[in-house]
């Protein structure tokens, strides 16, 4: 019985590694296809009269960043008679007064700006954007989340793409204004760069589906309406609308040379909250649109890439399963030979290293900085697998859930900072760190040196995320 149990554990471990390996091969395909040069640095000149643009700023209790956002929107260079700014304010705190004061300054300066408020938050951000569309006068709708500070040239460089009537959305790249604040913010920035530098670029260049990221992008109003409008039956309304629009035949453009700076979450609690929503929402969109994507009249390469994109977060449950099984499989020699662990470590980590190295090198990051940030990003991803597995499982249920705003620091020196809504047991990752500490000691005592790199990566990841979570919880 014990031998059968050992074999079952070994096969389960290998099965998880093989599935994870497929996503690793997908990353390597992206790296092979990646070309940073070329693309679309800026839109062509507007042919004739500029289209009217409505800039929508959805905010909810954002006192630390609301003023900065409204000022940045008011500084956008665009013909004043063809620019409208809507602050979609669902706030219940002093953010309302801050927004009103900033909008009044814009109006006094001759900007067409107004605040729109709803009686309730039905539909959360999607509901606010839908409500704003009812009175918006723009044929183009530009969206910025509260933590963004768009550069003045943003509209000038992107609006020209809409000269092609087939274009439904143009997405800019996110920048990270607090990247150097800590190891945590550097790791997050590296993870985001993989998405914005490599994934978006490869998908856009290859004519594959990619998504509007909820902010720092411009929509053609007709594309939104044709796709069924903003809907709130998932927590990622941006991803949902993106796929519905592209299934309707609208073309998306990615302009990576236009960068909109934003703040990455400065605390582990805020990061967990953000990532939970993104992971759960992507699974919800897969449940909602998986069948329509398979049945679409699109090439199979488009459909398969779309499904790979929407199911990407399945990697977290696989990593958690590997984390639970690895110490058992690694510390008994008769279960799996060392070369298997070394091969698994190489296959599953090499693709990650190459993927993020490609993005950091494209951005011109120095070698020493990018190698350290890549290692931090890998360990952070491993440490997040507990909370992210919960998000994936929640996404498989039929409950939409609540849209939880990610707290921003912004001008917290002037304003009281927001607290993060905590999920799960604080520091639960430390239990897995202890599990791997035992495995490291056991493997070393048995002379299983080939397993140690894999074991140490998991140990550091769980210890880091669990320790940050516990410290943050203790300070509340």
Image: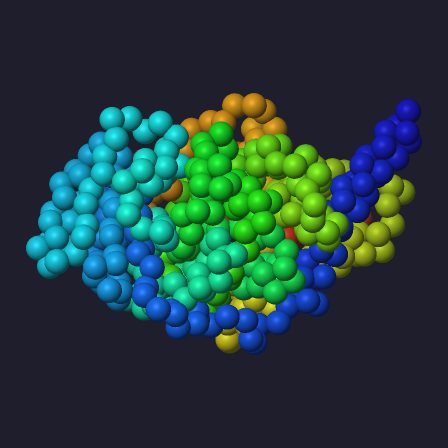
Q: What residue is at 37 percent from the left and 53 percent from the top? A: 140
Question: Percent position (x, y) of residue 173?
Answer: 45, 61
Of 287 and 192, the residue lying toward us: 287
Quarter placement of the C terminus: top left
Of 348 and 401, the residue lying toward us: 401
Instruction: Judge whether 291 appears above or below 23 on screen.
Output: above
Q: Is residue 317 left or right of residue 469?
A: right
Residue 12: in sight, yes or no?
yes
Q: What residue is at 46 percent from the left and 34 percent from the top? A: 231
Residue 177: in sight, yes or no?
no
Instruction: Judge whether 183 appears above or below 115 on screen.
Output: below
Q: Is residue 31 left or right of residue 222?
A: right
Instruction: Judge whether 345 appears above or below 395 on screen.
Output: below
Of 74 and 3, the residue lying toward us: 74
Q: Is residue 253 left or right of residue 5?
A: left
Q: What residue is at 84 percent from the left and 39 percent from the top? A: 10
Q: What residue is at 37 percent from the left and 33 percent from the top? A: 127
Question: Percent position (x, y) of residue 240?
Answer: 52, 40
Question: Percent position (x, y) of residue 26?
Answer: 71, 55
């Amino acid at each position: 019985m014990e031998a059968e149990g050992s074999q079952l554990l070994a096969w389960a471990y290998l099965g998880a590694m093989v599935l994870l390996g497929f996503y690793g091969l997908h990353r390597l395909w992206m790296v092979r296809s990646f070309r940073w040069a070329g693309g679309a640095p800026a839109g062509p000149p507007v042919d004739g009269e500029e289209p009217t643009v409505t800039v929508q700023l959805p905010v909810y209790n954002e006192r630390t960043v609301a003023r900065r956002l409204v000022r940045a929107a008011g500084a956008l260079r665009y013909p004043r008679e063809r620019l409208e700014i809507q602050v979609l304010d669902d706030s219940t705190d002093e953010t309302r007064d801050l927004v009103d004061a900033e909008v009044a300054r814009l109006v006094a300066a001759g900007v067409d700006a107004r605040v729109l408020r709803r009686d309730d938050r039905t539909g959360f951000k999607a509901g606010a954007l839908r409500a704003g569309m009812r009175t918006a006068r723009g044929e183009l709708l530009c969206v910025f989340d509260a933590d963004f500070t768009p550069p003045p040239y943003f509209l000038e460089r992107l609006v020209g793409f809409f000269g092609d009537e087939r274009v439904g959305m143009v997405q800019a790249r996110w920048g990270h204004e607090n990247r150097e604040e800590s190891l945590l913010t550097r790791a997050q920035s590296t993870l985001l760069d993989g998405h914005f530098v490599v994934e978006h670029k490869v998908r856009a260049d290859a004519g594959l589906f990619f998504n509007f990221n909820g902010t720092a992008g411009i929509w053609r109003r007709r594309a939104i309406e044709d796709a069924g409008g903003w809907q709130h039956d998932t927590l990622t309304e941006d991803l949902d609308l993106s796929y519905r629009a592209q299934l309707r035949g609208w073309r998306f453009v990615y302009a990576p040379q236009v960068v909109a700076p934003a703040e990455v979450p400065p605390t582990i609690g805020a990061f967990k909250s953000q990532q939970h929503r993104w992971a759960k929402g992507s699974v919800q969109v897969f449940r909602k649109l998986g069948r329509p994507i398979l049945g679409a009249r699109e090439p199979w390469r488009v459909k398969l890439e779309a499904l790979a994109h929407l199911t990407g977060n399945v990697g977290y449950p696989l990593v958690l399963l590997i984390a639970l099984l690895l110490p058992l499989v690694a510390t008994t020699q008769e279960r799996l030979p060392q070369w298997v662990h070394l091969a698994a470590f190489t296959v599953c980590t090499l693709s990650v290293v190459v993927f993020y190295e490609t993005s950091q090198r494209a951005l011109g990051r120095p070698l020493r900085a990018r190698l350290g940030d890549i290692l931090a990003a890998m360990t952070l991803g491993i440490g997040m697998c507990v909370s992210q597995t919960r998000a994936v499982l929640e996404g498989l249920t039929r409950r939409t859930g609540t849209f939880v705003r990610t707290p921003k620091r912004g001008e917290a020196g002037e304003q009281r900072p927001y607290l993060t809504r905590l999920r799960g047991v604080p520091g639960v990752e430390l239990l897995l760190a202890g599990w791997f500490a035992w495995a490291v000691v056991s493997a070393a005592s048995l002379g299983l040196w080939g397993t140690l790199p894999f074991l140490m990566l998991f140990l550091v990841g769980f210890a880091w995320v669990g320790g940050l979570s516990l410290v943050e919880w203790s300070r509340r």
